[in-house]
Structures are given as C-alpha cells and as structure tokens.
Amino acid sequence: MTVTTEGLGITTRQRWLANSVELLSSMRFAISLLTVICIASVIGTVLKQREPLNNYVNQFGPFWSEVFGKLDLYAVYSAWWFLVILAFLVVSTSLCIARNTPKILADFKTYKEGIREQSLKAFGHRAEATLASDPQTAANDIGQALVSAGWKVKLQSRDTAAGQGWMVAAKAGVANKLGYLAAHSAIVLVCIGGLLDGDLVVRAQMWFNGKSVFTGGGLIADVPAQHRLSPQNPTFRGNLLVTEGGNSSTAILSQPTGVLVQDLPFSVELKKFVVDYYSTGMPKLFASDIVIHDLATGEATEARVMVNHPVNYKGVELFQSSFDDGGSTIKLQALPMAADTRPFKLEGVIGGSTALTNGNDKLTVEFTGLRVINVENFGPQAGSATDVRAVDLRHSIESRLGAANKTPTEKVLRNIGPSFSYKLRDAAGQATEFNNYMLPVDVDGTRMFLLGMRESTAMPFRYLRIPVDDRDSIQGWMRLRAALKDPAMRDKAVLRYAEQAVEPGKPELVQALAGSASRALNLFAGSDPILAEMGSSAPKGGLQAVSAFMESNVPVAEREKASDVLVRILNGVLFELNQLAREKADLKPLARDDDARNFMTQSVLSLSDSFFYTAPLTFMMDDFTQVQASVFQVSRAPGKTIVYLGCLFLIVGVFAMLYVRERRLWVWLAPGSDTGSKATMALSTNRKTMEADEEFETLKSRLLQLSSVKGQ
C-alpha cells in the first residue's frame, strides 16, 4: 500500500461538495493545519499569555497591541480560531485515517504471492540459483527456514509449461503500517483532549447557556448567577486564592475581557503555608496544608499541596500555583522628601489604600505587597537572580537614579530582609510605584537604605541609595537633606566653612571663599537663580546642576581644575552643614574619621540622586504582621486521560515507523533439469538501508547457498 496526499473521493452531483470532502480528507490539508498550529504555539510560547493589557501596550505600542488583541494573540490557546483549527484537524485527520485504514488492513493480510517471475528480476535485491531438490521440496524447506526466522510465509503452486512451480511469498515488519494508524490516531486524541480541556466547553456555555463575562468589582459572593458556572461544569481551569485561616469555594476563570466565577463542589481551608529554604537561601519547598470540606456531605479531608505534587479530590485537581499576601498589616513612618512635609506615622493593610493630603494635592497610598524574605543575587551577572521571583537586586541598584556607580566583580548571595511595595496615586489617577527595604543593605562595604521607584510596571526599579548614620538609621541623611533645603542653614554653613578654611585676619579671603561656597551649595541645593535662567532643561539640583554650571560658565581648558576646586569646596560646606544639623538635633559633632568621610561621600551622591526621586515623601517600614495566602490552580480535565493515551499512541507510532522495516520476500521455484529446480529470489523493503543489504545477503546465503549475486 502507498499512502498518498489525495483525499477521499465521493460520488455526488455536487462538484463543490466532492472537492471539499477531498480537500478536507487530504494529507496536504492536515499538514497545513499542523503548520498553522505550530506557528500559533510558537507565538503562545514567546508571547506571555493573559498579561494585563497595559503590559502589552507598553511593549508593542497602542496600535499593534490593539491589533494583536483583536487576533487573540494574548490568549492563543483559547482563541476561537485556534479551537476551530483544532476541530478541523480532528476531522481532517480522522478522514485520512478512515480513507487509508481499509487499504492498510487489506495490505496487512495479503502476501502478494501472485507476482510474476519477470517482475522479480526488476527488483534491486535479486538473486538466481539452481537447487538440487524439486520445486515443492525446495519451497517447503525455504518456507520452514523463513518461519523459523520470524517471517510469515505463504506457498502457492503454479502450473507451467515445464511442470509445476512454487512461489514462496513471505513478509515481516508489517507493524510499520500500524505505526501510521497509531501516529495519526495520536493527533486526533491529543486534539480532542485539547478541545475538551480548553475553553470550548466554557465558551459553549456562554454561547448557548446565557453565561457572560463579569467586568465589575466587589465581593465574589455578590456576583450574579449569569457570571457563575455550575459545580457540575465538566471542564474548567482557574485560580483559587485562600488566606491562612480562611477558606474559599470559588475559582476565578480569567477571560480576555473579564472573569467567570466557577463554583466548586467543595471549599478549601488553608491551615498553613510552608516555605523551606536551602542553606544558600534558595527556596526548596512551597507547600500548603489544607482541609477540603465537601459541601454535599460535610466530610473534611486533610491534605498537603506541593509544587509538582497536586491533590486530586473527586476529579478536581489542586496545584500549588503561587503564593501571595493575605492582608498583612504594616506600620510605616512617612519621611519628607520635600520641604513642606513633616514626618508622621501610618498603618495599612496589603491590598488596601489610604488617602493623604499634601496641601492642595490629594494623594492615595496603595499598599501592594510585602516580602518578608528577600534572598538576592549581588553578583555582577545581570539576570542571575536566586530569588524565586527572579529579582536581580544587584542589576537594579546599579541602575541608580542619577550618579554613576563603579560595580565590583564578586558574587554575593544573601538575605537582605523584608521589603514592601506601594503606589502613590495623584488626583489625576497617575501612579508611581515604590519598593523600599526595611533594613539597611550592605552594598560595596557600605550599609545603605534602598528606596526603589519606577513610573511603569514595564520598567525595572531604580534605587535611591541612602547611607546609614552613626546610629545605623536613616535620620542622619534626612537631617542633612532638610538642612540643605533651609536657606538660613546653608548660609550659616557657608560662613562657618569659610572662616575655618581661611587664616584669621583675612576677611577679604573669607568673603571671596564664602561667595564661591555659597554658589556651589546653592547650585547643589537647586536654589541658585542661574538654574532658572537655563530654562526647563536645567537640572533641578545635585551634581548635575554643578556640572551644567561649569559647562556654561567655565572655559574647557580650565574646567577640570575648576571642577576639582568646586567639588572640594562643596564637600567641605556639606560637612559643616551636617555638623549644624546635628547641633540642632542636640547631637555631638561628627568626628573627622574614615566613617564620617565615607558617610559624607555617599551622602553627596545620594543627595544628588534624590532630585530624581519625584515623590514628596517616602515610607519606611517600622513593623509588620504577616498574613500569607496560597494561590491554587484548580482544574477538572477529562481530556487529560485522552491526551495521555494519545501520547502513548504517538510513541508507539513513531517507533513503529522509524524502527520497524517492512520487508517482503519472494522465491520463485521453477522445474529445472532432471530433479532439480531454478530459484529466483527478490527482496522489497520500504527503506533502502545498509541493514537491508546485509539481511538480503544473509537470506541469499541461507536460502540459496550463494556467496555472490547472480544475474545483476
């Protein structure tokens, strides 16, 4: 039997119908559908599925994100066109199987013993010999030898002009044909399983049963019935979030335009969420100790759900998908980043929000996340995070808000303590996201507080690095920044610096140095009038403002020398400004040692970067009470068994087609002179291989006792 690409031909007067059936049942149509499915699968693998729409807008832009959305590329495997292609592939492949199965079965049974002697001489593998025994005896001997070698044999006698001849027809490896049926059946089974476990059943309920997507908000219990699916729903796949000590019996099925609520036949109570770590800090276990309460019988079943170890309860499987915050409470201290704000205390719940007033500005603080353990990679390789959520803090804090940073080459892995994230949303609805660490982090040998900020979720966090003071707190830096914003404190620091730097009795030098120091400090503070004259492109302050002033007022040849002098003056004035701030807080002066110099060096860089920190205030976490939540993926997948069966068929089919060679052997025995016979042997195989050549030589030597081929 030869498998062709032609389809099933039917007899009908409607030519279009005959052509449609032929195309649908043809192998070329099935291969085309498989190609389209492969391309769609590549798209679904490369493009993240079911992300928030804003992420796609940021990635592709407004136009293309809308085009891709219309094509359902953000949910490829549940797109209507993908399901239609799967359905057509099932029909097309089934018709291919139905068309070729009768031919395969008929070919499976036949030995093709009616082949003529002249046809045997046209085969590539052929041989001729003269045997001593008569044709019947030789046929029986050859047949017995082939049967003992595993061949299936059929003998046929023929009357010829020279007497009675015998045809020995044998075949082996006919399971190769079954491989074709098994492989094609596997495609049908896998596609049927995909259709059953996909969104087809859910969409059918939306089309024919009055169900619709829910796009509103509020409590899940208040969602109307038209947005809820029955517990008897034969197939679904959704997410179930349960907080510690709480329980839930409803899963959320994400749809392109909203959600559907899937009622479960049981409720899940989360007793405890467990996280265990390796000695390196890498998480090695995520598990949820749960109690499943059957809503019909009231039966309670305890179980543990772990990653790659789901729990099956009455046909519904629960997978450990991820974890989240279950409403932890945090206590914060609000610190001013602008001159007109004052410190205050604030409490919040993760997932909640609090309204604030900053003069005429209305702000809303949205508490978005709490992470108690942050095991980070401080090595130089970007993207090599050890944290389970793939955070690479080394790469992030090197993307500083302003000043440049020289990075080391060593790799350091450690837990740097809790962090929390929040959003500040203005009256217009625009939000900026922040991520602050509770404890100072050792960065390049200096302990620093890290305050992260980003304007969009598509961007990485950039970190403001604030050095700790002599009490290992952030207050020293905050005092220095507040003093920098105070004109009177700046003038006093300038005067003190000038008086200490100039020998007594030289008031004109004091006045000149005070003028230069005042210009440098005011530029750094962003309050020098010359910055306003530069226009909207002028820096707000910091080292950037000093650099801009030098570029516009100092000749290129003198710029390097002048910058060294100006930076030295600036460092000295800032040190005196810090001393004044400490005096105002009733603290003893800072000693002029290495620790003080390191603090001032990092403070200068941090103060310069702070002009890029646009928020009027920042929050530091004083305390927290963690409440964890576990996210389960719940699914009822009747097609899973069908897919597994299809995979088994595919393995069997591929191995049968690749490793089983179909061979057919014919030996024609014609009467010869006296009592002997003339033998003509030929071998046919579906693939020309070296093994076929070797096998023919073996058969030739065994059956005809020949050492070389005759008549080729």
Image (cartoon, rainbow, N blue to C red):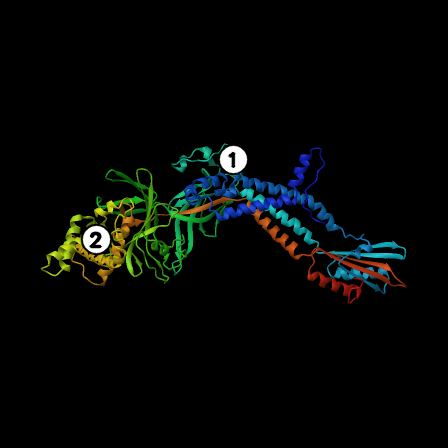
Q: Is residue 140 left or right of residue 456?
A: right
Q: Dot 2 surroundings within 10 Å: few (below 14), some, or many (20 or more)? A: many
Image x and y of residue 467, in percent: 26, 56
Mark 1: few/some/many CA within 10 Å (<14, 14-19, 20+): some
Above-or-below relation of 120 to 195: below
Numbered disc 1: secondary structure:
helix
Residue furthest left in the image: 505
User: Does 494 sit left or right of 164 as displayed?
Assistant: left
Q: Which amino acid does label 1 sit on?
A: Gln
| Image spot of residue 651 (x, y percent) | 61, 53
> Residue 535 location, x and y as percent?
27, 44
Looking at the picture, tell me which residue is in the foreground, 33 or 352: 33
SS of the residue under disc 2:
helix
Q: Where does residue 446 sit, x and y in percent of width and height?
A: 28, 59
Q: Which of 516 and 207 is in front in this view?
A: 516
Q: Is residue 595 above or below residue 344?
A: below
Asked if residue 673 is positioned above or below residue 180 in the image, the reply reads below
Q: Name the residue under label 2.
A: 520
What residue do we see at 22% from left, 60% from top? 596
Q: Distance between the residues labelled 1 and 2?
A: 72 Å
| Mark closest to the chain's N terminus, 1 or 2 | 1
Q: Quadrant of residue 425?
A: top left
Q: Find disc 1 in the rendering and name its residue.
A: 205
